[in-house]
Image (cartoon, grey):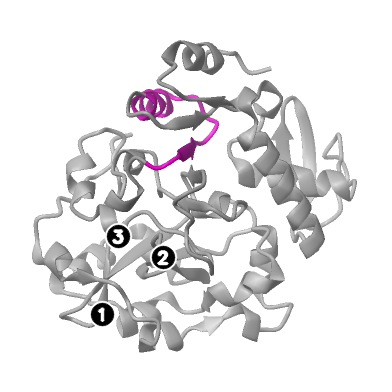
Amino acid sequence: MKMMNMILEHDYLNTNNLNILNENSSIVNEQIYLNTLSPDNISVLYSKNRFIPSIERDLYFYVENIEEWFNKYVHLDEETQKYLNDNTDFQTAKTVNFMGFFGKDADSNIISVVLRNISFGGTFRLYYKFFYDVQKNKLILYRNQLPYSWQDIKTLSSIKEFYWHRNKKNKLNLETPIIVTEGQYDSQFFENSIAAAGIVSTMIIPEKLKKRNLIFVLDNTRTSRIYRASINLLKMGYTVFTWPQRMNPFKDFTEYAEYYYWAKINTFYAKDNDLPDGLIPKIVGSVKLSFQKYADPTDELIDEMKNNLKKIVLSGDNLVSNKDLKTFDKRFSIIYA
């Protein structure tokens, strides 16, 4: 299905006005952060499903009414308002809740705001990204949906210093290996990491991160897009993570984390007959597993999971570098077990 590509040639996203968002801004201070909410709040429960440690819940905030939030913090010019009015997903968004965070660059400057809908079943996904316009003193919605092509690199290049983001309290250490993942929730499993926020955007590396020791961890889907991105990154001299065959059932580290967690507490069902209420069936390999709706991992288990993933990523057996296209081709072509 062909996706609509909104051309970024209008004033709504004036790249000359994009700027760092001050941490003392009302946009930052007025949010409802997860560490201030009760343990049974839906956003806190969702943060557990995303394996966010309790000590990091002050980095995420809760949005109960997306329309009110847009009206208060987002510059809604006529064109953007029309886009939202005509957007089916946004009409659905009015009926659900969101969890958000402030995306930071390598120096921990706030460069973006990200909202993701709260969904435990994974059947409905909404993702909104905003940049700060210093003249309007408002957030600007980045409403372009990246197409399944490479033509959007030029557009992304104009905002590349504001696109990659992380959500950590510490600064990025530029002198040690930096893990770059496609998505934010995958990058959270690693301390020295940053999210490229998509496959296409892996090609628009921020100036400060160019020529650094970057290890790219792309999703485990083995599509032509993943292949082309990986080959280009290798040609540029970066390192690419190759998924070991035993992890083929998992699309990304978030799925692996789910499996790891439920395996630890032994909540697996080989068949879906008479499953308890609140269980979500999931296919791993040829076996149907069923996961409870709400995960409740301890901080200790999350640390254990992070250490395990770090060993997997940094293992020499799973990395390809030094422009070794032959080795990557061989590993990429392995058929799913």
Q: Which of marks 1 and 2 is nearer the N terminus?
A: 2
Task: Look at 74% across and 56% down and name the residue there.
Answer: 302
In the rendered image, the residue lying farthest to the left is 10
Task: Tell me the residue that label 2 is attached to.
Answer: 104
Q: Which of marks 2 and 3 is nearer the N terminus?
A: 2
Q: Are marks 1 and 2 in contact (CB under 8 Å)?
A: no
Residue 96 visible: no
Please name the amino acid that badge 3 sits on. Phe
The image position of residue 106, as x and y in percent, is: 41, 59
The image position of residue 144, as x and y in percent, is: 26, 53
Marks 1 and 2, how far apart at CA? 17 Å
Left or right of residue 214, residue 277 in this image: right
Rendered position, 25 above or below 262: below
Residue 118 visible: yes
Task: Look at 74% across and 49% down and name the residue there.
Answer: 305
Q: Quick one: 187 or 256, which is closer to the camera?
A: 187
Q: Quick one: 41 or 261, which is closer to the camera?
A: 261
Placement of the N terminus among the 4 image quadrants: top left
Rendered position, 14 above or below 271: below
Task: Tell me the residue that label 1 is attached to.
Answer: 138
Specify the segment rendered in magenta. Answer: 212-234
